[in-house]
Amino acid sequence: MKNHPATLNVQLAASACVFNLTKQDLAAGMPVRLLSSVTQLLLEAMRTFPNHQQLQKNCLLSLCSDRILQEVPFNRFEAAKLVMQWLCNHEDQNMQRMAVAIISILAAKLSTEQTAQLGAELFIVKQLLQIVCQKATQGVVDATLKFTLSALWNLTDESPTTCRHFIENQGLDLFIKVLESFPNESSIQQKVLGLLNNIAEVGELHVELMVQSFLDHISSLLHSQEVEVSYFAAGILAHLTSRGKDSWTLSPELRASLLEQLHAVITKWPPPDCEMVAYRSFNPFFPLLECFHTPGVQLWAAWAMQHVCSKNAARYCSMLLEEGGLQQLELVHTHPQTHKDVRLLAGSILESLQRHQARTGQHAHTHCSRHLPPPQ
């Protein structure tokens, strides 16, 4: 492949050999450096012969390997773009499932900047929404739908541009349709609500979410028996109510009711058995911790932080210290306006951070609080 990059027959035969060698357990025993070189050659072949269906298929089949996608270093950003380009030009159902699976995994591995750059390509969001629309219309819950929702969820994470593309392409109406189409599918609800959390993190898009019918759906899902579903519904409400009464465009009574429900529901959540969400950073949570006028909002942020820090201390305690979370949590913990439920969770997170520091010797960075109210 390396010596004959422009010879189709060589690339076709070689890419088929790569698939046959990596599809079995043989890949597990191969050196990472070798797999890395081979993966880059596959990407080069995809780029050189974009319209040759069998070659593209061979390369996609080879890429769809857990070992390669998770452990092997290669240009994931380039790979995601190439796979998306293939997806936009082909309708093979089996390959479509594989392509969106690859994209959903790659998107989670990209940096925030790369994710934003990828999601900024309007055709990518459009194509993924088209697949979701197709599945919702057919009433089909399958791997393709789940992978596509995961891909959109990852691409909108801390990426306001991608979130805007989602809204501009009628994504909100479509996702309401998905919730209505699959009312008993908690795995679908979780992915839909997870993405809508990302939308709700973007302040300028709040006006798009201030729709009574949408909030009725979210309010209903807040009371789901599945913690994973209730959690993400709560996150949407926390973000929408966090900016104060002046930014709320619906009835004040609705806002007050939602905040009351939010607080009550969170206090009843049992600790989940596993880590139910992954975060790139805690930056979206810091403004919520400063909402002393709405303790339900603070409570959701504190519960989220406590959950991931308790399930994966090595990653999240380290992240929290690096991003200046220690200082803000100490302020919340000692502030006289802090609700007792919030104080309890803040104390629990601080204990986790202290244990992590004792174990690792990691120092805390300083976080600049924007608008903490003075003690009264």
Image (cartoon, rainbow, N blue to C red):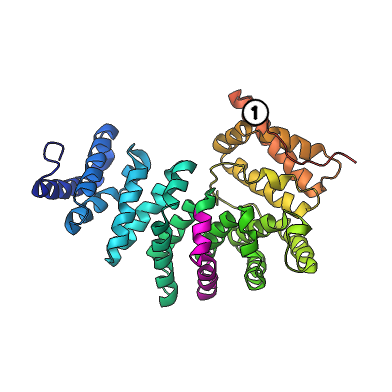
Place residue 216 in its image quadrant.
Answer: bottom right
- x 48%, y 52%: residue: 154
Helix, strand or loop status at disc 1: loop
Q: Is residue 180 left or right of residue 78?
A: right
Residue furthest out toward the top: 361
The boundaries of the magenta stretch are 162-186
* Badge 1 density bin: few <14, some 14–19, many ≥20, Cα 10 Å: some
Instruction: State the quadrant of the N terminus.
Output: top left
Residue 128 in the image: x percent, y percent?
A: 41, 62
Q: Which residue is mark 1?
A: 365
Instruction: State the quadrant of the C terminus.
Output: top right
Q: Is residue 329 left or right of residue 168?
A: right
Residue 286 in the image: x percent, y percent?
A: 68, 43
Q: Is residue 229 above or below residue 332?
A: below
Q: Is residue 214 left or right of residue 156?
A: right
Residue 322 in the image: x percent, y percent?
A: 60, 31
- Amino acid found under the numbered disc labelled 1: His
Q: Is residue 324 magenta?
A: no
Place residue 332 in its image quadrant.
Answer: top right
Residue 50 in the image: x percent, y percent?
A: 22, 53
Task: Report the magenta stretch's main SS.
Answer: helix
Q: Is residue 355 above or below residue 9?
A: above
Q: Is residue 143 visible?
A: no
Q: Is residue 269 left or right of residue 254?
A: left
Q: Is residue 185 magenta?
A: yes
- x 67%, y 36%: residue: 325
Q: Is residue 132 visible?
A: yes
